[in-house]
């Protein structure tokens, strides 16, 4: 029988985690106090703003333990926080990991989860410097706080978009939503876990390096990462910028995988592209004359495209979708809403 | 019927919380970006170390909604984090609040919870600058990250105690444990909630101002706050300091309330004083010649005593209790352990 949390206890687990992080994690000389005291402590750089964000994953709501490996789950949990830092143009420095666990959780599962966290932090030489462990009555939860930094004045906010700005998006939004559908419509078979779209859901890629490179140019007027879907997050960006947007449907990219999955399930692929999907791609805006330069930079930094999909408008709060034939329709506001009743109108 | 979370949805709730914080919270001019973007951002002071800590409260495990008001619960959740910052000698600056909620959670309950958070932050002019909201399948959870600061070189760690140092403790540890017992042995009646010991459990007081004042002297060699009980946390301090401790039982203070409650329930009050209890009092160590000065300072800062209860010894890991007649016994290592099986020996 595998070793369970109840076999080693809270303080036994803390020792194991501590040892794992010492062995496999990065150590920063700006950290004056890591895991094992009342708080962690670090020395900030005086030329930077500090960024801080937190995000939680809840069992049953955001993940099913039999549909994702603990290593991938750890990567996903860390990626979504790194993505938030990247959407500011910053880089992650430190993480605090707060876990809600069960007595019967396997110790090896928790260790693999931490290896997933560390895997995503490695490229940034970022360190886990603290956290909290508690028993959770029912479902597991993973709540991560990430501290990052951005050079003063270089941070890109959601609120800077102006009418006339181009709207650009990285990669292929919607692939994550498609992967989730494939996962939900399949038995928990190993094979399915290797499907490229399921991988996009279970093991998404942040664009934090790209975000930092784009922010560095000073040409990005607003930026947000996609965790609530393209329309949902574009809506957040427009709301913060007190403006609206129009999207040219024909400019939205559909990957071959996405088309095939939509055919297979008999669904409209644009529902995935526009609707709820946590792809951790970037939506950004810039003056029209700067679009090409940002696209070239993206080509140098990554293998994914940065696609111009529309324009910022003056119509505060309104996002329109323009079809190839020129007909225009007002997009339904979208984005995950965790609490809204199912039978309520989408004001969600 | 009261308004439920499902009536207003996630984004409706975010708007309410945002408005509450704008109206009743403190705004810091070092915060360059508050709630409502991908991350929060702030400008650090160059002469300070930053401190960061997180702590979670889980329904059923750490609180029962029918035994504590949401306002008190909010205060308690924030207090335990502020206490950790205080145990470093620092002061809290910012908080991120991550909540796991149910669709049927009353909106007024959540607003009262936030008022509790803000109540505890007010004395420090500290601000809530971010967070996360999610649906939690079953129990509620409240996970708070607090960022604080301490002047460089003034932070007090757990690891600085040396053999011969005095051990001092603030206030009356054990009162919180007694309050919990009274609460568990009573029906959920309003009257019981007003009992001073129940108040110590439901509405504990941190010693962060005292911690900062003591740290400022430069005379405190090690410090920790009591969240795992006096023996548990003294054990953590000794472990970090690679030393042991001896406690003189007759020096441990018993408040009148504690004595009476122990009589009432037929229990040994010293089990509360020494055992699992989250009192958020401070345990600290100093060279023997500095004890009186720290006690006088405490008298000026607070209304609670700072009591000398024992000495740090060379016996790494061993905590002894010395009775009035001189007999000595090795204390059982203690401290909450969330995961250990009940039938296992206390190595917990």
Image (cartoon, coloured by chain):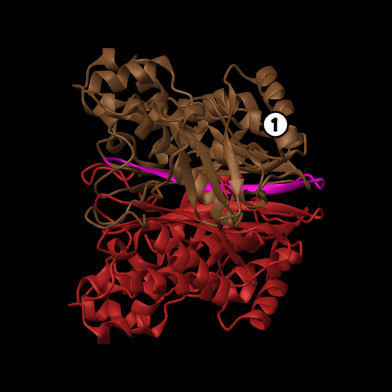
Chain colours: A brown, B red
Callout 1: chain: A
User: Which image quadrant is residue B178 in?
Assistant: bottom left
In the image: residue B348, left or right of residue A88: left
User: Which image quadrant is residue B347 in?
Assistant: top left
Q: Is residue A247 above or below residue A266?
A: below
Q: Is residue B45 above or below residue A1?
A: below
Numbered disc total: 1
Secondary structure of the magenta portion, mostly? Answer: strand
Residue sitting nearer the eye, B215 or B203: B203
Query: Where is residue A67 drawn, in percent x and y?
Result: 28, 26
Residue sitting nearer the eye, A184 or A127: A184
Q: Quadrant of the N terminus of chain A?
A: top left
Q: Residue at x 29, y 65 (%)?
A: B7
In the image: residue A140, left or right of residue B150: left
Q: Secondary structure at mark 1?
A: helix
Q: Residue under circle 1?
A: A291
Highlighted range, magenta: A44-60
Q: Quadrant of the C terminus of chain A?
A: bottom left
Q: Residue at x 31, y 19 (%)?
A: A261
Residue A48 within the segment the image draws in magenta: yes
Q: Residue at x 30, y 42 (%)?
A: A61
Query: Where is residue B307 drawn, in percent x and y?
Result: 56, 73
Q: Residue at x 82, y 45 (%)?
A: A47
User: Which image quadrant is residue A130 in?
Assistant: top right
Query: Where is residue A209 drawn, in percent x and y?
Result: 65, 28
């Amino acid at each position: 029988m595998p070793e369970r949390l109840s076999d080693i206890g809270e303080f036994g687990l803390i020792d194991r985690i501590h040892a794992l992080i010492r062995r496999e994690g990065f150590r920063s000389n700006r950290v004056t106090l890591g895991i094992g005291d009342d708080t962690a402590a670090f020395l900030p750089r005086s030329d930077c703003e500090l960024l801080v964000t937190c995000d939680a994953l809840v069992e049953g709501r955001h993940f099913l333990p039999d549909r994702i490996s603990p290593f991938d789950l750890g990567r996903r949990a860390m990626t979504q926080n790194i993505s938030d830092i990247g959407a500011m143009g910053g880089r992650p420095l430190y993480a605090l990991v707060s876990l809600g666990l069960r007595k019967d959780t396997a110790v090896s599962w928790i260790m693999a989860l931490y290896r997933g966290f560390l895997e995503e932090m490695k490229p940034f030489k970022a360190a886990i410097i603290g956290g909290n462990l508690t028993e959770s009555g029912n479902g597991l939860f993973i709540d991560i706080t990430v501290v990052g930094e951005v050079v003063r004045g270089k941070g890109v906010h959601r609120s800077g978009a102006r009418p006339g700005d181009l709207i650009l998006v990285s990669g292929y939004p919607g692939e994550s939503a498609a992967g989730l559908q494939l996962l939900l419509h399949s038995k928990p078979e190993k094979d399915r876990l290797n499907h490229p779209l399921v991988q996009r859901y279970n093991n998404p890629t942040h664009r934090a390096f790209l975000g930092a490179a784009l922010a560095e140019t000073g040409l990005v007027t607003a930026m947000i990462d996609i965790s609530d879907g393209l329309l949902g997050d574009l809506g957040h960006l427009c709301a913060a910028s007190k403006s609206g947007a129009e999207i040219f449907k024909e400019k939205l990219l559909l990957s071959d995988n996405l088309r095939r999955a939509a055919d297979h399930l008999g669904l409209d692929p644009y529902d995935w592209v526009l609707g709820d999907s946590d792809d951790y791609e970037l939506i950004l805006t810039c003056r029209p004359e700067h679009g090409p330069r940002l696209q070239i930079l993206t080509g140098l930094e990554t293998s994914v495209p940065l696609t111009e999909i529309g324009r910022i408008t003056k119509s505060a709060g309104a996002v329109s979708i323009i079809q190839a034939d020129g007909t225009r329709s007002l997009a339904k506001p979208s984005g995950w809403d965790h609490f809204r009743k199912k039978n309520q109108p989408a004001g969600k």
